Image (cartoon, rainbow, N blue to C red):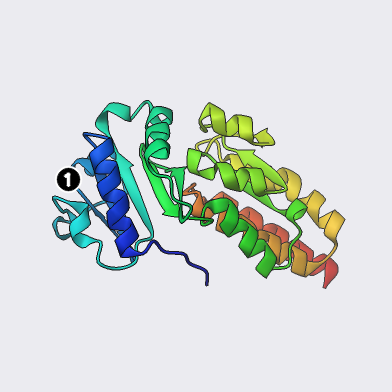
Amino acid sequence: LYTEQIQPDLARELVATIRSSIHGVAMGAGIGSELFAEPKVIEGLVPGIELTSDRLVDDIAEVLTSDVRDLLIYHPSYVNKLDDLFKKVKDVIVDDRVDIVYSGLPMIEIVPAGSGKGTCLAWLAQQLELKQENVFAFGDGMNDLSMLKWAGIGIAMGQSHQRVKASADLTIGSVDEEGIAEWIENNLSNFLLKTGTLISLIMYSSILSFVIYVSKLSFSVRVSISLMKFASLSKFGFE
């Protein structure tokens, strides 16, 4: 529906600049639907993200022959000092064709300019003809900051980094506490009363599903049931 890519020549240029300026980094790249990476990057991956041997390369520049979704920068000495690594990358990459952002992993990410989660959410809301103030976004990672700031109400999960909580409008329970489901059950009925239309609820539910998906949060059975419950109520009450 909507995509931005980094051209291969630019991607190779960025890799060369980072490699010569920040010693000890390991890099990865999203190409198509796959992640390719140098072996050291594996240390920074979370359970559920796996790299098969055919996607491990000694030098990431070798596979940058087609458009790139994003570049990942990992440094074992900066796992707990991502702000410092972010600043280093920001200092050496000065190009208005890309943005430097925090990844959901202990890495820094380079993405096409204007393609962060906030931009993506704004585009989706426009397609669905939703007002910004009617969009609620849930997030828990540093890569969710732009999305939480753009949404009418940005909601941080309980397990979020302190900086994420500070950027959000409010903080709810953690994933383990099923914070999203609890918030939906306690607040979505108020939204229904304000909008009074089935189409608004369906679109609102789409926004919720989308935001939860891109944030890599647990879309639990309880969350799904909560959304279906209120969709049914709106159909019964307003159609």
Position of residue 225 measured from the top left corner of the image (x, y, whole percent): 61, 56
* Amino acid type shown at disc 1: Pro
Q: Is residue 185 above or below residue 90?
A: below
Task: Say whether residue 37 is left or right of residue 95.
Answer: left
Task: Say whether residue 90 is left or right of residue 197.
Answer: left
Q: Is residue 146 above or below residue 53?
A: above
Label 1: how many residues lie within 10 Å, few (<14), some (14-19) or many (20+)? Answer: some
The residue drawn where x is 48% and y is 52% is 96
Q: Dividing the picture into quarters, in which one does residue 9 lie? A: bottom left
Q: Nearest the camera: 159 or 182? A: 159
Residue 35 visible in the current orientation: yes
Q: Nearest the camera: 27 or 207? A: 27
Q: Which residue is mark 1?
A: 39
The residue drawn where x is 36% and y is 36% is 106
Q: Nearest the camera: 218 or 77? A: 77
Q: Secondary structure at mark 1?
A: helix
The residue drawn where x is 59% and y is 39% is 179
